[in-house]
Image (spheres, grey):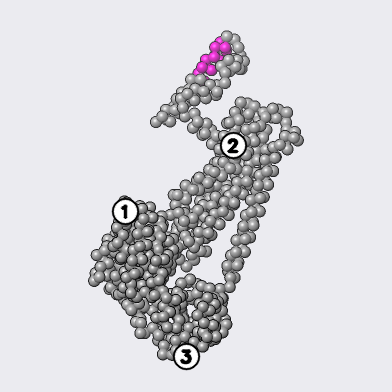
Amino acid sequence: MRLFLFFRRKTDLTEELQNHLNMAIADRVARGESPVDARSAALRKFGNIPLIADVTRERWGWLRLELFMQDLRYALRQLRRSPAFTLTAILTLALGIGANTAIFTLVHAVMLKSLPVTNPGEIYRIGANDKCCTWNGTMDDWSIFSYPLYQYLRDHTPAFEEMAAFSTNNPSLSVRRSGTTAPAYPFIGEFVSGNYFSMFGLQASSGRLFNSADDAPGAAPVAVMSNHAWREHYAADPSIVGSTVMVNGLPFNVAGIAPSGFFGDRLTSNPPDFWIPLNQEPALHAQNSMLRLPNTHWLYAIGRAGRAFVPAQVQAQMTLEIQQWLRGQNELSKGDQATISQQHVRLSPGGAGISQLRDYYSKGLYLLSAISALVLLIACANLANLLLVREAARRRQTLIQVALGASPKRVLRSVLTESILLSIVGGIAGLLLAKAGTRVILLLAFGNAANLPIKSAPSWSVAGFAFMISLISGILFGIVPAWITSRSDPADALRGTHRATRDRSTLPQRSLIVIQAAFSLILLTLAGLLTASLNNLEREPFGFQSDGRLIVNIDPQVAGYKTEQLPALYQQLQDRLGQIPGVLNVGLSTYAPQDGCCDNSGISFGDAAADAAKSKMTTWLRVSPHYFETLDIPLLRGRLIGDQDTASSRRVAVIDESFARKILSEQRSYRTAFRNGWYFRSQWRL
């Protein structure tokens, strides 16, 4: 309302001043002066009308807004008069701002964004490391837990309002809606405790989320479906809630749909489609169930802090709880029992979930952020040079404005307004480029991701970042031309510019060129180093041949195969795959070399009872004959696993050179190891 009154009074003021001037002119004409002379004399006596209006409006307020609108209109006229310069400036800025915004989109999603849950700052993770899959025995710094150990910690740590657990490895599920003839569809599942959703403070999008009663022994099997799976695969059909689906051939009731935007407890390329209570794990995994195994650790634990929560105190308490629990486990080896006093746990903030992608990509994102910042600085230096050249071309016009009464402050403000306007338009174009750039980066990094919870479209926080960086860049590349213009001498407009003046005016431009060249050299150096690093990573010798090899992941249990049927199935697969034209070798293993995962257990030598305290924790894979030949892994000594190594033959193993040097050298010589059935090959790294 006040702004409307201001513009209305401004119009009245203009009319009033014009009426006073017209009355003065009419009075002089009445006294015999010519209209031209009367107007000139009246203007000289009346004074500077625009200045009088400015002083009057300044007392009313809102003058700065009016001056800003004038500067904005002037900047738009100047940009419209130079379309080539305007287009070049906008494209240059769009590239710089777009690159920064695209990288910040990823940094925000991976490094800064919390889980979409209630009060994520109250959530703490029990543990600080990401251990994949399963772990047997002790681990010094605890991050994953067995189900009995989780129950013990949950019941003996009242500092947490709630403590939930969920599986480290998400199983594959074969799901088909009951009563239909449609084929089963593969989904990703996750086993979670009954208080999983209540600990996060979530409400169902439809139906209900399961609770602790659904996780009790003997409870009816239920599942919660993700919002993404509900919409993508079931077209948001409301009848799916309460219906029965066959999961790996077993009936489960769909209790409800998870809230929109919730992708689980960790940022991963393929988040869960179904959440299933932990107590249903034995039904789905049958003989391979780990639920009741006290020394097989396969669960992450996370909890919501209570009111009187002191992390250091709770951490010390939970360390003692783990040690006490371990002392009551009779199945621990003597070696594990000897290390109980060394076992400890660390609490870490859990509002962002299990930070697997954060750990994997943090260094790369920081490097990309630094490179994109250099790109923006080069763009700013380039635009500053363009503005300096442009300002030099219209230098005489600016000096005449100063000579006619424009204050240096007003000239400075007009140049800055033009540069900031350019940066805002460039920022808008940069947002469009950022969306496309983010999509390209996601496709390169997660080409096989079916449901990546990172959106290429900038969020409001990312858009705010783009707007902020646009303003900063506008000030950066506009401050030097504006400063030079404000220090101009109006007398130069009358006597012209001489050589010394031109030399002084080009000094800042030369400095900017030097700065731009320096930044460009740094950027080119970083780009060369990054290219070399990527090339080295691509050609890094892993100890096995990856060219011409294909990996096929299978889960026979999902298809309904029983444990006793697996040996025949695996043999049939190996034989039939080997008959495909062009296939030279076929090998099977529990994990692929690129998985970075395996099983682990303790190894002892000689008399197990006598040497139990000296057992060594090591990792291992189960492989089929021809596994090493398929990956072209060279043999150093001994022999490889062959068709003669069956379930009824002597048990053999192939070890790597690192194991032989570090472990066997402490127990016996290499020659003795061979006599006792140990064989090893050259080292290859997972």
How crowded pointer 3 is (Cα within 10 Å; few <14, some 14-19, many 20+) is rated as few
Q: With respect to residue 399, does 102 lie above or below?
A: below
Instruction: Residue 400 in the image: state x and y as whole percent.
Output: 65, 29
Q: Amino acid at mark 3?
A: Gln
How crowded pointer 2 is (Cα within 10 Å; few <14, some 14-19, many 20+) is rated as many
Q: Amino acid at mark 2?
A: Val
Query: At x 53% / y 45%, what residue is drawn?
Result: 470
How crowded pointer 1 is (Cα within 10 Å; few <14, some 14-19, many 20+) is rated as some
**In the rendering, which numbered label is found on residue 644?**
3
Query: At x 33% / y 79%, what residue is drawn?
Result: 287
Write down the residue under mark 1.
306
**Label 2 vs label 1, nearer the camera:** 1
Q: Secondary structure at mark 1?
A: loop
Magenta residues span: 18-30
Q: Secondary structure at mark 3?
A: loop
Query: At x 41% / y 58%, what residue is drawn?
Result: 348
Instruction: Confirm whether residue 321 shows in the render.
Output: yes
Q: CA distance from mark 3 to mark 2?
A: 84 Å
On the picture, is 241 further left or further right than 263?
Answer: left
**What secondary structure do most residues of the magenta stretch adopt?**
helix
